[in-house]
Amino acid sequence: MSGLSVLIPTVVSIFTLTEMCMQLALSAFANITYTILPAAAAPSLPTIEFVIPFPPAFAILSIALIAPFLSRRVGHVLGVIVTAGVAVISLVSPVGAHLPVTFLGFDAVLFNVDAFSRVMGVIFGTIGAAAVLYSYSSQASNRQTAFALGYVGTSIGSVFAGDWLTLVFFWELMAITSTALVWDYGGEAVRAGFRYAIYHGIGGSLLIAAVIWHYVDVGSFLFTAASGLTAGIPAALAAVGIGVNVGFVGLHVWLPDTYPRPHIAASVFLSVYTTKTGVYGLARAFPDGNVLIAYMGAAMALVGVVYALLQNDMRRLLSYHIQSQVGYMVAGIGIGTALATAGAFAHVFNHILYKALLFMTAGVVVSRVGEENLKYLGGLRRYLPLTALAFGIAALSISGFPGFNGFVSKGMITAAADKKNFDGIFYILLAAGVGTFMSFIKFGYYAFIRSTPDSGVIAGSENADADIISSAIGQRVAMLSVATLCILFGLFPDALFALLPGSTTDAHPFTLGHLTEGIVLAVLGIIGFALVKRPISNIGKVPDIDAVINPGAFYLTRGLVRGTTEIFAIVDNAIQVIATRSLEITANPYGSIRQPAAILLQRDPDTLTDGSLQATIGTSVLLVVVVLVIAFIGTMSM
């Protein structure tokens, strides 16, 4: 707790220092006249005029169905081919290509190409191919990769949907396939998978409710029928439902709980598709932006990075950084300008590359060393040099250092916030950028740079050089290919700008001010880590909101179950008493009514013997006539 008390004011100080330094830097360059070189016109993409006979998602799902019955090599080769093929199809399909159908009796579009879906299809297919190759080299089973391909296929089905009905159909299948991917590993992943399924079941139900409400108001599920979802309650339901997928603050705990649990290759897939499909859905639901969503994105960026800095588990640290980085995207969607939208989807593209690469490098460490805790690692650059290189590129990319892809897309979003005068969002995102540098300096220092600690797993090995096997060839190919793309899109952003929705006219990543901003954040990150290194090393596991949600849900559910059970028990006992008493009365009517009849007739109960209350024939006829008259009157009144 003493370490935490030091960390909190330190983080606040860094936030303040960030704002002061950026204001000084901007003011220093305010009086300098320099020319902004106009960005080169985005190259037009080659397209092919053709009609897709069926959605590309179905091709991947078909391979997913047969993969378990094939050899490992054949199954994974087909997986690489089909996912890479989807990337190519997404790239060359002309904007406007679509496949209209009737689905469940409604007009639907199973395959729709526009600027949003194309960029998602290209990156989903590209990283899918790299992840399948990585899975093969990481000894993933055919069944696991089949679940992963099912997950990829349903995600691609969601982003290529041309209507809300198709989107939620694939959205729910995505939740099912991703849950199966988590469960497949067994062990702790099973319980985490149940919690994952519950969160996404609730989120999906809220989205479905919003879509149904939207249909009632608009009369169509097609995206072209209205701009976004109906405002009001439907939009609020959709925001919360999609917010589960993207990791809104308070709805995010499934993410760090689930992603560190399954097989290392499964974590690579999981880091890519669910949250980014959520960002796509958010852009469809709120095409003109929303200020509350913008501020939620900023909160995600800051909360995620603070929690990430406090983690020692590698994959848990990376999972919190998913929330933080997705926060940039959500902020861009919320700001809603053309530059912000382009920046949000540029960050989707770039984040998928470096985040998958980070999980790949962490997976190599876990598989080769058998340890996830940074406290027990060190000196791995000597044993895993290519993995260390790939990590360094990914770390600089996610931190937004100039020359790497994250620098370009982060700068677009912060520039959009500044241009729209969202000063709070602007400085929160800059502070999150400092925290990101700090987190990955920590990761790199403890895992690769520092000397092996005496208590570490390597120090405890008598022959570490022989025990630690270098990464597999397929892992290296996958990591270095993705790392190359991180550098390529950082140095030549126009190659990405050609794919983006929105507008990149105001995107100038290599201005002096922007370059200075990236370097200042890096320097502040180094200073910040030096300040908090000792305090955070003394901090144990830091509770998240799930420390309240999980036991609260447990006791609430138990209370509801017990309360319902007790009510049923009371009702059951009452019915048993009534039934037993009725049987007693039927078996011995005189014994049951003797006392009440004696009071009513003012007679001695002993005189009421069996048969003494028998009605005469006249009384019986009178009773029958009265009943008939009442029935007749009731019939006439109807």
Image: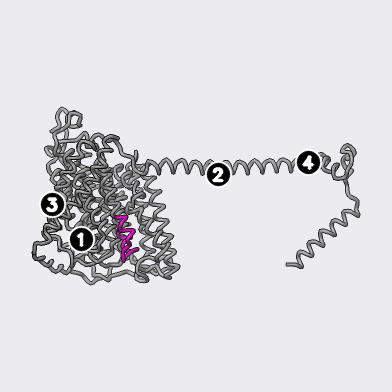
Mark 2–mark 1 distance (CA, rounded to whole Å): 55 Å
Residue tagged by mark 1? Answer: 415
Looking at the rendered image, the disc whose residue lies closer to the viewer, 2 or 1, is 1
Looking at the rendered image, the disc whose residue lies closer to the viewer, 3 or 2, is 3
Q: State the SS at label 1.
A: helix
Q: Nearer the viewer, residue 463 or 214?
A: 214
Residue tagged by mark 2? Answer: 564
Residue 569 x/y as whole percent: 60, 41
The image shows residue 220, relative to residue 87, as above or below, that is below
Residue found 17% across the figure and 42% down from its top: 444
Residue tagged by mark 4? Answer: 587
For residue 519, the mark is 3
Residue 429 x/y as whole percent: 24, 54
Task: Specify the principal SS of the magenta part.
Answer: helix
Which sits earlier in the primary sequence, circle 1 or circle 4?
A: 1
Judge from the rendering whether residue 583 lies leftward or rightward of residue 206; answer left or right: right
